[in-house]
Image: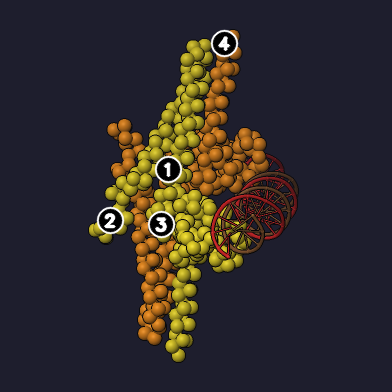
Chain colours: A yellow, B orange, C brown, D red
Amino acid sequence: MAASNDDMAREKLEEAKGYVIETIAETMDVYGVTPAAGKLYATMYFKDQMNLDEMREELGMSKPSMSTSVRKLQENEMVKKKFQRGSRKHTYAAEKDFFHSFMSYFCQMWDREAKMNMEAIKQAEFELDQIFEDENVSSELVDEARKIYELLDQSKVYYRWLERLVASIRSEEIYEFLPKDPEDKNT
Amino acid sequence: MAASNDDMAREKLEEAKGYVIETIAETMDVYGVTPAAGKLYATMYFKDQMNLDEMREELGMSKPSMSTSVRKLQENEMVKKKFQRGSRKHTYAAEKDFFHSFMSYFCQMWDREAKMNMEAIKQAEFELDQIFEDENVSSELVDEARKIYELLDQSKVYYRWLERLVASIRSEEIYEFLPKDPEDKNT
DNA sequence: AAGTTTGTAAAAAAAATATTTAATATATTA
DNA sequence: TAATATATTAAATATTTTTTTTACAAACTT
């Protein structure tokens, strides 16, 4: 009868993992990954490490699909490659610290958003300045240009804020304002 | 010759807007919208308000496409419907405060992520507890279950943090730690 | 160095998503 | 209330994205 208890326990254990795997996979779109990559990460989350063949086996998908998914997850620093001698298979481990994944992904996104838009605004301001410098332009047009200029100027406040947000997350300063675990006196 | 100067100025003005429109559209994927919706928002950003026909005209797309895009943008609170009497056309205005869009979109996403995963973890814990309560389960299996339990317990720290982050953004407390505009003494 | 295993790139297929056309519903005005 | 204008839904089409199949390159082993 001991085996039967263990069988039931095993089933419950797998069910427990199943709930979480499914939900992580479902919410991984927040981190901009495909369903396959989401499912893969969620699966790896409960494993110590996996190689491409184990992934293919576990998810029932092709190896190149695992290869691309794992690469995408590496870009977001949600998966790390483990160097292990003795086997020629590459093995990978899921980053289990969600704070790290959060930082890596959103900082990357926001950085890109801020930099690209700041650059575009700079170009736009260059054009607008030429309008302001030309004394023969009608005042209606100058007013219109000034309105645009002010709109862009205002938006820079946001992009600069985004950049400071990114910096405070990367430096972990943000956790002084918003502690990871307010109960825990150690963090 | 005055007209010529105005023509040149007009061209520069449109070019200036063009740079910014293109880049906003390109970076709008951060806010999880389609290219069409991104382009639409970027276009509306420089307008006071628009109706569906003007959108279709401006972007050269179909009206239902504008209808769906505008609805998606409304979900993220990036566009608001303007009630105006006299015309039976609905008109819409872009939210020009990027802080508001940031809040609306990310809080929605993170809220969903935290709530769904917390719920899944609760279900998983229920299953695991049954294993712990059964004295006939082998110690190997109990250990395995305990490892999972601890992993999930640790992840709750992150989800709770996400919830507090969301709350601090919605309440605007975050701007006490990270002011919108550090130069400006008014905000 | 040859043979084998593993990983990735390129091309093709499949699936998912977005867009349009056509049809319908809703709302406004007369 | 009927006529008309506008918006939305549904079905079909097109496009994009994801996944797989196939082919190739790199790395390890003997």
Residue C29 placed where, x, y %? 62, 39
Q: Disc 1 sits on a residue from what chain?
A: B
**Quadrant (top left/top right/bottom left/bottom right) for the C terminus of chain A:** bottom left
Which mark is on residue A98?
Answer: 3
Q: Amino acid at mark 4?
A: Ala
Instruction: Estimate the spatial distance between the alpha carbons at disc 1 and disc 4, rounded to whole Å.
Output: 42 Å
SS under mark 2: loop
Query: Residue at the spot x=47%, y=27% of the render?
Result: A122
**Is D6 left, or right, of B160 in this rendering?**
right
Can I make out residue B157 in this image?
A: yes
User: Which residue is drawn at the image coordinates 40% and 49% (left, top)?
Assistant: A103
Q: Residue furthest top?
A: B1
Q: Residues within 10 Å of mark 3 (few under 14, many from 20)?
A: some
Whole-angstrom CA distance, mark 3 to mark 2, is 15 Å
Which residue corresponds to mark 1? B100
**Dot 1 or dot 4, earlier in sequence:** 4
Label 1 to label 2, Cα distance in Å?
31 Å
Residue kind at label 2, given as amino acid type: Thr
Q: Which mark is residue A187?
A: 2
The foreground one among C26 and B6 is B6
| Relative horizontal placement of residue B88, taking residue A85 as reference (left or right) | right
> Can marks 3 and 2 be said to lie on one chain?
yes
Q: Chain of mark 3?
A: A
Quarter holding the N terminus of chain A? bottom left
Q: Which mark is residue B2?
A: 4
Q: Secondary structure at mark 1?
A: helix
Name the kind of residue labelled 1 in the image: His
Report x, y in % for residue B150. 36, 68
Q: Earlier in the sequence, mark 3 or mark 2?
A: 3
Dot 2 surroundings within 10 Å: few (below 14), some, or many (20 or more)? few
